[in-house]
Image (cartoon, grey):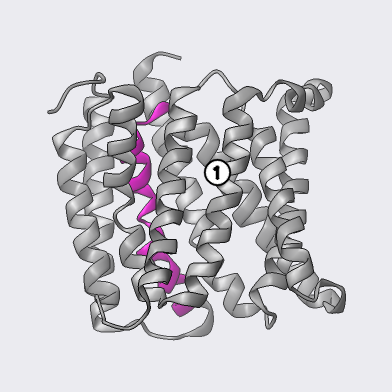
Amino acid sequence: MNRVAEYRLGLILVTASAVAWSLAGLFTRAIPLDSWTILAWRGIFGSIGIAVAMMLFEGGIAWKSFRHMGRPGWLFVAVSSLGMVFFITALKETTVAHVAVIYATIPFVAAVIAWLAMGERSTLRAIVASIAAMGGVIIMVGLGTEGSLFGDLLAFGMTLCMGVLMVIVRRSPEISVMPAACVSALLSSLICWPLGNPLSVSAHDLLLIAMFGILVSAVGLACFTLGAKWLPPIETALIGSLDAPLAPFWIWLVFNEAPSKSTVIGGSIVFAAVVANVLAGTKKGPTPANSVT
């Protein structure tokens, strides 16, 4: 594929990952279990789903990929596992609103890391869209004075980890990070298993967690890792902001809980910012690295 085709495919795949990840809140709401138990089983089903996807795409040579992850692959495993721990702990130490607002800075965090690690500068279009998206998230959840400094630092640590993951995938496009994502999902399960009560889960809840793991972890991670290597990190992060307006949409659709006015207004701003950037990028194609337009 040429660069334009790769860029457009990257947009599609990363958007698909954002849609998949936005279902996390819906599944968490539908499953009446503690977070550690859900994450323990979700990691197992996620790793199985990714392994199956690898078999479908790579056939019998899929297992060889685990032996050839290289430093980028193992760095991906370490950073993603650390980010998961930061995320779960942050939700316990500070408010969800603070976590959401801090994570809304991910486009700028990813852009700075990409500039430091690769010398890749962001487009003016993406920067403006990221500012608009961050403003939309703030309108949705507010700033608030609750929470704690420790929890906020953990949330920023999680944001930093996600920015590093985006740059790893972008910087090493020749490396298959699917096996790394598989190992990461399994490792997250091992971390959460002793902290929850996974052996007391009913068959119905286990089925929901299986869907959670396959759709959110496996499909989301697969689309993200495949698409992020063709997009600048700031655009990958910006598209990921779609999670903010989509998550309450699924809750409204399934549980008939109408979102607040601020959620609708802020979510509309986020959605408009992402769509405008994607449409502009699709029309113009990728911008050469180290340039601002």
Query: How far from the left and from the top, in percent, is residue 8?
Result: 38, 30
Q: Which residue does the image show at 46% across and 47% down from the upper left?
A: 161
Query: How far from the left and from the top, in percent, is residue 122?
Result: 22, 32
Q: Which residue does the image show at 44% across and 30% down from the upper left?
A: 9
- Residue type highlighted by circle 1: Val
Q: Is residue 253 visible?
A: no
User: Image check: 207 left or right of 83?
Assistant: right
Query: How far from the left and from the top, in percent, is residue 135?
Result: 19, 63
- Residue underneath mark 1: 79
| Crowd tier of the residue under label 1, counting other residues whose Cα lies within 10 Å: few below 14, some 14–19, many 20 or above | many
Q: Does the magenta segment cover residue 55?
A: no
User: Image check: 138 left or right of 199?
Assistant: left
Q: Which residue does the image show at 68% across and 65% down from the upper left?
A: 39
Query: Looking at the picture, does residue 256 appear above or below residue 57?
Result: below
User: Image check: 212 left or right of 126?
Assistant: right
Residue range (magenta): 230-253
Residue 202 sits in which quadrant? bottom right
Query: Looking at the picture, does residue 78 appear above or below residue 146?
Result: above
User: Image check: 64 left or right of 126?
Assistant: right
Q: Residue furthest top?
A: 2
For the image shown, how many numbered marks are present on the structure?
Answer: 1
Q: Which residue does the image show at 67% across and 79% down from the upper left?
A: 34
Main secondary structure type of the part rendered in magenta: helix
